[in-house]
Image: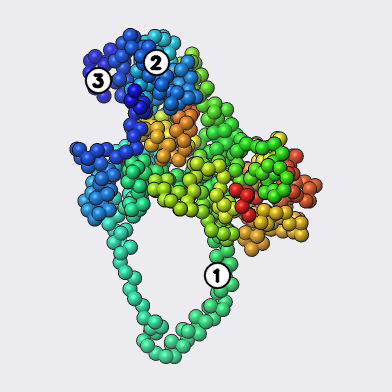
Amino acid sequence: MQLPPEKKGELRWLGGVSMAGAVGLLGFCGSPSRNRRENHRFRQWQEKCEPNVSLDRPEEFLLDLHLGQADEDVRGWLDAELRRDAALRAKSERLGRVLMPLDHWSASSPAPNLADKVLSYIAARTDQRNVEEPRRGWLRFPAGRLREGLAIAASIGILVVLGVPLLSNMRERSRQVLCAANLEAILSGTSAYQQSYAGAIPFAGATAGASWLPVSNSGTPFASNSRHPYLLVKYGFVPAAKTFVCPSDDRGPYVESKARFAKDQEGSPAWDVRRNDDFPSAANISYDSLNLAGASPNLRPPPTVAYMADANPLFVGAKFNESVDADKANSPAHHGRGQTVLLMDGHVQFAKSPIYGTGQDNLWLIDGVRSYRGTEVPTRSDDAFLVPGCPQSSSH
Amino acid sequence: MKTPRRQSGSTQPAPSAGPPSDEQLLKEFLRGKDSSFELLVRRHAADLHQFVLRFTGDSVAAEDVVQESLLQVHSSAAQFDPHRRFKPWLFTIAANKARDYLRRRGRRHEVPFDATLNDENDAGRKFLDLLSSDEETPDVELSNEESRRFVKRIIEEMPHHLREVLILAYYQKLPYKDIGDVVGVPLGTVKSRLHAAVVHFGERYRDAIATRKEG
């Protein structure tokens, strides 16, 4: 990038500033006499836009400056600070040296006819969609002969009789595959979240003495367990909110999330993912997750522990059902055949029993506890207890 | 005092003077003018390709993702909110498709990331530590090609969520606000991820050079 000679002098003391940084520095023309005015303007801006940023820490803005993301007010303020403070200049130089190698990675240019290829591709795909399916005659038998027609009809009848249960099984198998794919996507998002939060699984905070089941009486507070996995959606670690809905789940109307760029429409049932702290409805969260209530939530569970699975059969309609045999009952999600389980070690498996792993832990229970009111919490880090999310106190 | 703003933070389409804005072209396309869509493709295909290529590290996949992304723009144009900017929308679509591609490919060879370094709350402190550190990159003569290979490898091994903000901010030069829209996270998270990405890159690059020097 060619800089005017008068700007090069301004940049010299900033050391090896990358090209992007140099763009950000073009506004550096202020004289030390502007210092007080710039500081005043910056303070006004800071109070309004970034109240948590300390004016005593101008180095927090150096990356903005090097990436060309700082606006003229911030640049003016930093200009004055950089002139005044040699240590800050040294930090800016160091940052420039850290960023400089990034300029060496120039991605190879696309094919010169890329745009033409894209346009041809789009034309071909849209033409394909516009072609009408050829109309087919109703029961048009080959050669039009009745005997052959009857033979074909009989064959179809036999296939239907034999095929319906087979088809039903195949459909359920494909739902299990899709369900496993959902949990794998959630696993991927959870791993990214853990990398960002010192290995901790998503945790939205605890309320002292709160129940994870909705409570109708007394002053017991309620804190849905689904607030925790919701962080994965809210902060984009799992991009599609529908990933949390098992394809076999038919518990009610799914509430669509607001398209990120779509206009707000009054009366629309859409919910804004980023402005909320929990799923909008129980129909939007099929999977039950590790109970994180209590004073010492299990934020770094060992690898052998189950983190998430299809719905716990002990809690129907957000109420504990004591008539269910917790040692044998499978999730209702896959017709009672089993449940897809996501383990902390990264495995996703379809388990045909609630007892899993070498520790023979029960997914649905706290060890030794057989009855639940909503305030029970596991006491051991290797004891998985998967509980329903009950967003906004709606029924599960 | 005029309202201070981050550079190019505006989300409004550009005024009509000069070449037509992306948003105007999309509007014309929706009214039936196919040549406007063609102009959009010609304007953004190469830029989008650079982004996806850096994100996926695979030139064939990059072309596929670009094609599929622009096809989706073509078929979903009516859903675009004309009050928003076109480019972040386009990059959001491409980033989603690139992530899907990486997921399908089952790519899992990112290096384990030091958890304390990765904590977004901690990213600011680590970043300040990096700026204050006396530890310099070892003085080794590297060819540009060698340096390019180091940079490429380090970025490709970076966790997705750091890699995408670094590429969007450094190479694509998208404003923070637009990056937030593309990635679907608040502005503060964009900044903390960027700080974490720079620390990650700086430390890995320094280690790579040190290893090369010892070798």
Viewer-nearest residue: B185 or B17: B17
Instruction: Left or right? Give the position of A234 relative to A264.
Output: right
Say which mark, if any, is on residue A39. Answer: 2
Instruction: Left or right? Give the position of A86 relative to A306.
Output: left
Mark 3 vs mark 1, CA separation in Å = 69 Å
* Chain label for disc 2: A
How crowded pointer 3 is (Cα within 10 Å; few <14, some 14-19, many 20+) is rated as few
A8, above or below A310, in the image: above
Mark 1 vs mark 2, CA separation in Å = 72 Å
Mark closest to the chain's N terminus, 3 or 1: 3
| Residue at image point 67% right, 53% down | A318
- Mark 1: which secondary structure? helix
Res. B142 in view: no
Could you tell me the amino acid type at mark 2?
Asn
- Mark 2: which secondary structure? helix
Q: Are marks 1 and 2 on the same chain?
A: yes
Instruction: Left or right? Give the position of A175 relative to A144.
Output: right
Viewer-nearest residue: A144 or A34: A34
Which label lies toward us, 1 or 2? Answer: 2
* Chain label for disc 1: A
On the rendered image, what quadrant is the C terminus of chain A found in?
Answer: bottom right
- Mark 3: which secondary structure? loop
The residue that mark 1 highlights is A167
Residue A46: percent from the left, percent from the top?
Answer: 43, 23
Residue A349: percent from the left, percent from the top?
Answer: 62, 52
- Give the number of callouts: 3
Viewer-nearest residue: B165 or B211: B165
A171, above or below A315, in the image: below
Mark 3 vs mark 2, CA separation in Å = 27 Å
Viewer-nearest residue: A376 or B56: A376
Could you tell me the amino acid type at mark 3?
Leu
Say which mark, if any, is on residue A3. Answer: 3
